[in-house]
Amino acid sequence: MKLKQGINIGGYLSQCEESAEHFKNFLTEQDIARIAGWGFDHVRLPVDADIIMSRSGIMRPETIACIDRVGEWCREYGLDMILDLHKAYGYDFTRAGSKENVLFSDPDARHLYLTLWEYLASRYQEQDHMAFELLNEIVEIEYADAWNELAAEAIRCIRSVGANNLIIYGGVCWNSADTLRLLERPNDTNCMFTFHFYEPLLFTHQKAYWVVGMNPDEEIPYPADMDYYRSQSSALGLQGQPCIQSKAKIMGPEFMEELILSAVTSAKEQTVPLYCGELGVIDRAPAEDTIRWFSDMNVLFQKYDIGYSIWNYKGKDFGLSDSHYSSFRDRLFAAIGMKQSAE
């Protein structure tokens, strides 16, 4: 699988409206053709467990059919595809610390998780253009050991049905680059480590209403003085720590490389390939600074041979196909060396 430059299709089968109209119209074959025409080589498809399976373990044929269609369209247009379990029964990254997140303590939730992967692996094992991502983001660092155990069990479950598809998974703390060091080496030769990269969060998520401590009115530049970033990031708590703890003198490539190197080192030590499943800039950020951020990110990822998938194709405050990006999408694609540009 190539997995060099891809795009997420968040909001279709994850964190979405649950209606027949949505599942029919949100994503069409023309969207996949457009993505391929832009020059991307793969898509990452986030899927929530409750969208495709009932709590009693019964699959929902109407939404499973949506996955089937995306897989068929991707094959037709020469795209690889990552099937990402975005939320599981018993684990929702948006409810970190909640008593509802029982995946690592409740045998029933664990059983549902493994049952779903057994089903998906059985259904898509012949799709050699499709990879499986075990779970999107685990937030709490105290689950690091339990996650190693569950990931290993999920890998065994997938392989037990004869599926040889690439398996992808990452660490904790929102799948941060630094926590790949907590992952155990997989007992499997077709696995890949992943991380997410939205650093500095102060810039990529500026004015985001859902980020605790984020100023809803201040426009954040990139690059900028590091002291400015440290002072502004202090309000973000744990999510601001990468800036506060960084040794970089200027907010820019030096800062980004410092964080990426942690993931590179961990993957190298475990002899596992490395991939970035999510990165992107919110549609409230300045256009020129957004282009600079993507350009710097792309240079570093090429330097360390890391493929990536941009968040997001449509909506979710990050959509590359939406109006904010339309005025400068061509220049952004050129800045990251896309083979073709937007229409």
Image (tube, rainbow, N blue to C red):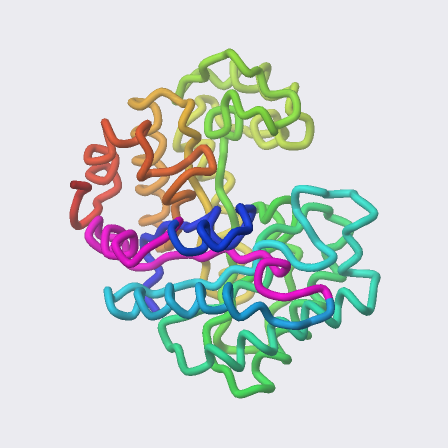
Which span of residues is magenta-colored?
26-55
- Horizontally, residue 298 falls left or right of residue 144, namely left
Q: Residue at x 71, y 54 (%)?
A: 91
Q: Residue at x 53, y 46 (%)?
A: 17
Q: Residue at x 58, y 24 (%)?
A: 209
Give the camera-side residue of 61 and 88: 61
Across and down, in percent, residue 156 comes to: 63, 80
- Residue 208, above or below 23: above
Image quarter of the C terminus: top left
Across and down, in percent, residue 64 comes to: 50, 68
- Residue 133, above or below 313: below
Q: Residue at x 45, y 33 (%)?
A: 317
**In magenta segment, residue 250:** no
Across and down, in percent, residue 299 comes to: 31, 42
Across and down, in percent, residue 286 comes to: 36, 20
- Horizontally, residue 104 falls left or right of residue 319, namely right
Give the camera-side residue of 74 and 195: 74
**In magenta segment, residue 50:** yes
Image quarter of the N terminus: bottom left
